[in-house]
Image (cartoon, rainbow, N blue to C red):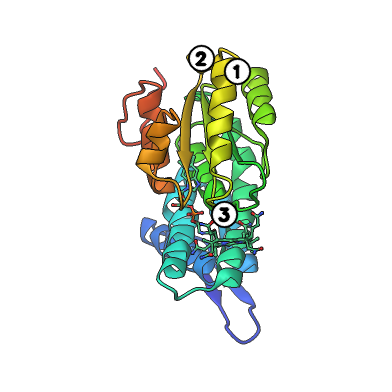
Amino acid sequence: MIRRDRKNYSMEITPFTMEDEVEKTLNQLRQMVVERDCNAVKTLTERMVEEGVDLLKILNQGLIPGMLEASERFRKGRFFIPELLMSSRALKIGLNILRPLIQEIRKDVLGKVVIGTVKFDLHDIGKNLVIILLEGSGFEIIDLGVDIPPEKFIKAVEKHEAQILAMSSLLTSTMSWMKFTIELLHASGMHRKVKTMIGGAPVTPIFAKNIGADAYCRTAVSAPFSAKKLLGIEDNGGTIFVK
Ligand code: B12
């Protein structure tokens, strides 16, 4: 449990004694992402890892809900762009601690997803949320970043033998690059091996249908369900049976 002194931001740390305290700390972590307190996110995440708290619990009940809450505040006009960006920076700090540890224990990958924001588009907050949720659900992610031309998407799918190609677009002027990428996928014959999934604020289900995408998600939260459905994986609420 970490008590935060608001004046000098010093923290007093005592060991977890009960499950109750884990829950309290998870809530605190969620809150620190919303409050954009990078130091507290780092300390709380490291602390919970040291105490042996389930890594996916830290991710799914601490970091992700914090970022979703920040996005929701932004959508309602209670957060401005700098606040949204700072929450995403706090989130990344926690993720950087968890990611290598989760990869180490999670050998049973559900599938590979190549993801990126399309050409001429630099927006990546939504895409990064999709990545976190897919990773947390057991997918291996190849993140190409932003401003990705069709050829680069196709090369990455081929190189990594990905089962899903996911694209994000936040500008009406860049949405057509999703169409061009899917066209190139067809021209190369690779559409038979890979499913496409698209999203971003200006994207609509009708647009997705018109350009021949396999799935459209309005929010990042639905991305893991759609990805599993595309690959014919039964969704059992997140449980992965080893045997
Ligand atoms: C933050 C922001 C920026 C930041 C981006 C920082 C970053 N690292 O991403 C900066 C300041 C750089 C920026 C720049 C610009 N921006 Co801007 N930006 C925004 C803003 C305010 C928020 C976008 C955001 O992050 N939302 C929060 C995330 C969580 O939501 P999201 O992206 O929609 O993602 C969710 C879903 O869509 C979905 N999702 C998203 N992608 C994917 C992909 C898949 C596969 C799936 C399954 C789901 C999925 O999951 C997410 C979570 O649920 C929006 C306004 C708004 N209210 O949305 C404008 C906005 C998108 N920007 C806009 C514009 C015009 C620009 C600029 C052209 C401004 C300028 N004149 O320079 C430049 C373009 C730069 C470029 N070439 O890309 C316009 C776009 C208008 C349009 N429809 O074309 C908007 C709508 C603002 C406006 N009202 O005019 N911007």
Residue under circle 3?
Answer: 125
| Amino acid type of the residue tagged 2 in the rendering | Lys
Indicate if the residue with disc 3 has its beta carbon within 8 Å of ligand 1. yes
Q: Say what secondary structure mark 3 lies in.
A: helix
Three-letter code for the amino acid on which mark 1 is drawn: Glu
Chain-order first, disc 1 or disc 2: 1
Residue 155 image point, x, y percent: 68, 23
Nearest the viewer among 243 and 35 is: 35
* Beta carbon of the mark 2 residue lies under 8 A of ligand 1: no
Kind of residue at disc 3 = Ile
Q: Is residue 100 above or below residue 59?
A: above
Q: Nearer the viewer, mark 1 or mark 2?
A: 2
Res. 13 visible in picture? no
Residue 121: give x, y in percent of width and height: 63, 49
Determine which quarter of the picture holds residue 12. Answer: bottom right
Residue identified by numbered label 2: 193
Label 1 SS = loop
- Residue 112 vs 73, above or below: the answer is above
Q: Residues within 10 Å of mark 2 (few under 14, many from 20)?
A: few
Tag 1 and tag 2, C-beta contact below 8 Å? yes
Of residues 226 and 197, the one drawn nearer to the viewer in this rendering:
197
The vertical placement of 196 against 56, above or below, is: above
Residue that badge 1 annotates:
161
Furthest residue to the bottom? 7
Q: Is residue 154 visible?
A: yes
At x 39%, y 45%, the residue is 204
Q: Which is more toward the observer, 172 or 99?
A: 172
Q: Is residue 159 above or below residue 43?
A: above
Residue beneath the point at 64% across and 56% down: 93
Labels 3 and 2: the sequence-earlier one = 3
